[in-house]
Amino acid sequence: MSIRVLPPEVASRIAAGEVVERPASIVKELVENALDAGARRVAVEANEGGVALIRVVDDGCGIDPEELALAFARHATSKLRDDADLDAIATLGFRGEALPSIAAVAEVEAASRPAALQTGGRVRLRFGELADQGASGGPAGTAVSVRNLFREQPARLRFLRSTGAEAAQIASIVSHYALAYPEVAFSLRLDGRESFATAGGGDRRAAAAGVYGAEVAAALLEASEQGEGASIEALLAPPSISRASRGYITLFINRRWVRSRSLAYAVEEAYSGLLQTGRFPIAVVDLRLPPGDVDVNVHPAKAEVRLRNERQVFAFVQRPLRRVLAGLAPVGAEPFGGWPRVAARPGPSAPGDPAPDLTLERAPLQSALRPGTPAQDPAAQPALPAGLPILRPLGQAGTTYIIAEGPAGLYLIDQHAAHERVLFERIREARASQKVEVQGMLEPLVVELTPAQEAALAIQGTALADYGFALEPLGDRAYLVRTLPQVLAGQDAAATGQGPLFGLSHQLVN
Ligand code: ADP
Ligand code: MG
């Protein structure tokens, strides 16, 4: 289909707003263009968090040399003709705004050749102006390079976060698309180093291995459901594998990566009773709905969508997930391995076990919960966040919650979350008072990072080392944890090492 400038009455119906907020938004638009062009290979490169260079190369249908310059005109698109198309959008792009918006804030070079032509075309734009154009003999497909982003907009440049944070966002975008399009071979290079690659064979689990690592991918469960004009296919982690943030719930509607609080909640709810509070599932949900039931034209970056029958869709998403999760052997409460004193007594291993003996637990809990109480062993005194009132522990429920009484009434404290927080505060305190003591690991722990985490680590690795974490790359995004801060010594490293480690790297990056 040829590229044309949209008539004003169609253009004016398109949700207006900023497309190019940060480097990752450029990557998103260029990757979406490649996918709309039917690419089977999408190679993404970014240097210095995408500010120095973003390059996306695809083997899609290409752009006719005669139309290459037109692709950079506002509201020029090959994907929409008229109003009616706008109500049933089947492509990722439709606004005809990405390329001109990107070209307005950077130096852009595009080379493209449709497979049927011997010679392709090439254009170069500098901050919105066409600087140069000519022929190009490159491979079939399209390559777009974006350099010196925001050089002419220093205020926008200052608004960006650290290079590591921007690179992590790019990694997050590309890895999400790799999960949504398992039939496409994606690769990402950050500052010249391969971050991840997927094979493109069409197997979503294989794509998940490229993104989350082989171990997580192998454990993922499959759920699916067919409805009238709708279908869902999901990969979800068993409750034994969980994460500390919602960032691992990935939703696609009609192959578009979307943020939907309501549907993410539908996934979360499906795990209700299976995960401790503060823990979230890993899930990749591929939802297909009749295009007319989804309005993607509500958000300038097309990240949010409006659903016609939200309640129905919520149930449709939840049903197959619950079915699969309900079929698992009950996991019950994992034996709790952390709260400094309580842990000395092994917790019950299954929900049916007798209730813990509260009289035994009361004394240590009391001292643990009361900030400022002088303790014999200062290491056992958790540094509770300031502002927590003095609480009187009443007991424990389900091996997960401490029930306590305080000035404002009854308090339920998630032991696991509280424990992680206490460790986190201790690690920070040690660093702040320059008393970081490091513990070498007898049995080094291997952690597998996501591309986004690895990108953050590449930049923040030295900062993490200052806190006492020394990581050594093993390849394939696996890292050997050589040392931990002393305050974590004796903790179950596999469980607790990840929490504070990534909590900390997250804080540092943001
Ligand atoms: P939109 O994607 O909303 O149509 P863009 O500004 O992103 O608008 O792109 C304008 C047009 O340029 C597209 O409609 C498409 O025809 C063409 N185009 C852009 N990128 C590519 C690509 N990688 N391969 C083939 N065609 C492309
Ligand atoms: Mg586009």
Image: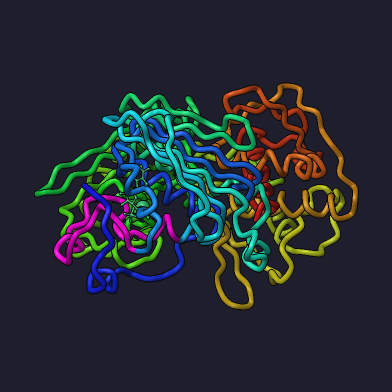
Q: Which range is magenta?
A: 75-100
- Magenta span contains residue 91: yes
Above or below, 262 relative to 358: below
Q: Give the image location of residue 281, x and y in percent.
A: 43, 45
Q: Is residue 376 left or right of residue 28?
A: right
Secondary structure mostly taken by the magenta-highlighted segment of the chain: loop
Q: Give the image location of residue 192, x and y in percent.
A: 63, 32
Q: Quadrant of the C terminus?
A: bottom right
Q: Nearer the viewer, residue 168 or 495?
A: 168
Colour convention of the picture: rainbow
Q: Is residue 410 left or right of residue 233?
A: right
Q: How many marks?
A: 0
- As drawn, which residue projects farthest toward the bottom? 408
Q: Give the image location of residue 394, x and y in percent.
A: 59, 62
Q: Nearer the viewer, residue 346 or 148?
A: 148
Residue drawn 54% across the image and 48% down it = 146
Residue drawn 38% across the image and 32% down it = 220
Residue drawn 63% across the image and 55% down it = 418
Q: Nearer the viewer, residue 301 or 264?
A: 301
Report if residue 209 is visible in the image: yes
Q: Is residue 367 left or right of residue 23?
A: right
Q: Give the image location of residue 254, x and y in percent.
A: 25, 48
Above or below, 261 relative to 238: below
Q: Nearer the viewer, residue 149 or 320?
A: 149
Tell me the quarter of the picture where residue 343 sits.
top right
Residue drawn 44% across the image and 49% down it = 28
- Magenta span contains residue 99: yes
Report if residue 342 is visible in the image: no
- As drawn, which residue projects farthest toward the right? 434
